[in-house]
Image: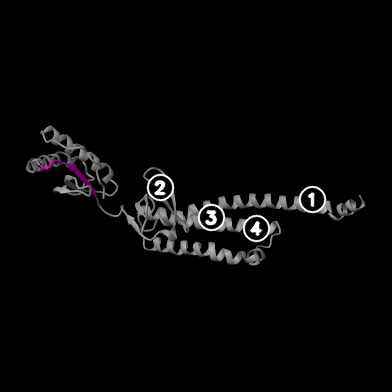
Amino acid sequence: MTYIENYWNKLHIETIAENIISKTVSLILLLVLFFLAKKIFDMLFTKAIERSIAFTKQSPMRKRTMTKLLHNVMNYALYFLLIYWILSILGIPVSSLLAGAGIAGVAVGLGAQGFLSDMVNGFFILFENQLEVDEVVEVGDVSGTVASVGIRTTQIIGFDGTLHFVPNRNISTVSNQSRGNMRAQVDIPIYAHTELEKVIEIVKSVNDNKVPQYPEIVNNPDIIGAITNTNNQLVFRVNIFVQNGKQYTIGPKFFRFYQKALLKEGIQLPTVTPIGHQ
């Protein structure tokens, strides 16, 4: 019992309790001040940075891209300071922690190197204006609409609604589908004995009637004619150039127009295959 009493007396319970209470109060005050400061910085960012960017001579999508990027950088800096202050209040020596036990080497070798690669690649993506928010792009095996461009990752919403986080260092090729007119490729399956001249007349008639109703079509449809597609199927191909993003609606619509007109004129068609978009 004497040993336990001596050990208990050496613990200085009162001092420990005071330290805990003091650090708890300090952490609460720090968090309150941090969130107040963050609201002030967000307000200043909106009034100063966003309005400044709004007056620049850039496209609306690029303005949104730059605004989100700068806002992300500000948040990274604020949260880094918050973590540093929390560790300092807890009495954890941050510099010694990173330098000791090889943690600094591991961080540089595994994390910092990738982080720097993300930042450098992200900088060149923005500097070269490769993509912007709300643009439809294809990055590797990910396709969709750009939701955000950060200093580490680019967020892309897939056509099925999935949100993809792509590290900037993994972006080697960007296929931007929002910078020019796109092609809606319509392939109508036909038989080898189909009368092609009659098909051409019907397709031209459909184009004359329907194209004026769709201002997103930028040129007269290009009638390619009978070809063999990648599945070795005989098809009658028509290319329709439209404003970017409209190819996914115009292609299927005109396929139905052509199909209905051909069947109405007695042209027999084989089994329908999916329409390709390029």
The first of marks 3 and 2 along the sequence is 3
Determine the CA span between mark 2 and mark 4: 35 Å
Q: Is residue 131 left or right of residue 109?
A: left
Q: Assess whether residue 185 is covered by the magenta stretch.
A: yes
Q: Is residue 70 left or right of residue 191?
A: right
State the extent of the magenta-drawn residues as a range.
183-192
Residue 226 image offset from top left, x and y in percent: 13, 47
Q: Amino acid at mark 4?
A: Trp
The first of marks 3 and 4 along the sequence is 3
Instruction: Mark 2 vs mark 4: give the one in front.
Output: 2
Q: Assess whether residue 54 is covered by the magenta stretch.
A: no
Q: Helix, strand, or loop for circle 4?
A: helix
Q: Amino acid at mark 3?
A: Asn
Q: Main secondary structure of the magenta part?
A: strand
Instruction: Mark 3 vs mark 1: give the one in front.
Output: 1
Residue with the mark numbered 3: 75
Q: Helix, strand, or loop for circle 2?
A: strand
Determine the CA span between mark 3 and mark 2: 22 Å
**Are the residues tagged 2 and 4 within 8 Å (C-beta)?**
no
Instruction: Mark 3 vs mark 2: give the one in front.
Output: 2
Tell me the quarter of the picture where residue 176 sits.
bottom left
The first of marks 2 and 4 along the sequence is 4
The first of marks 1 and 4 along the sequence is 1
Q: How was this image coloured?
A: one colour
Residue with the mark numbered 4: 85
Against 140, residue 194 (above or below) is above
Tell me the quarter of the picture where residue 100 sits.
bottom right
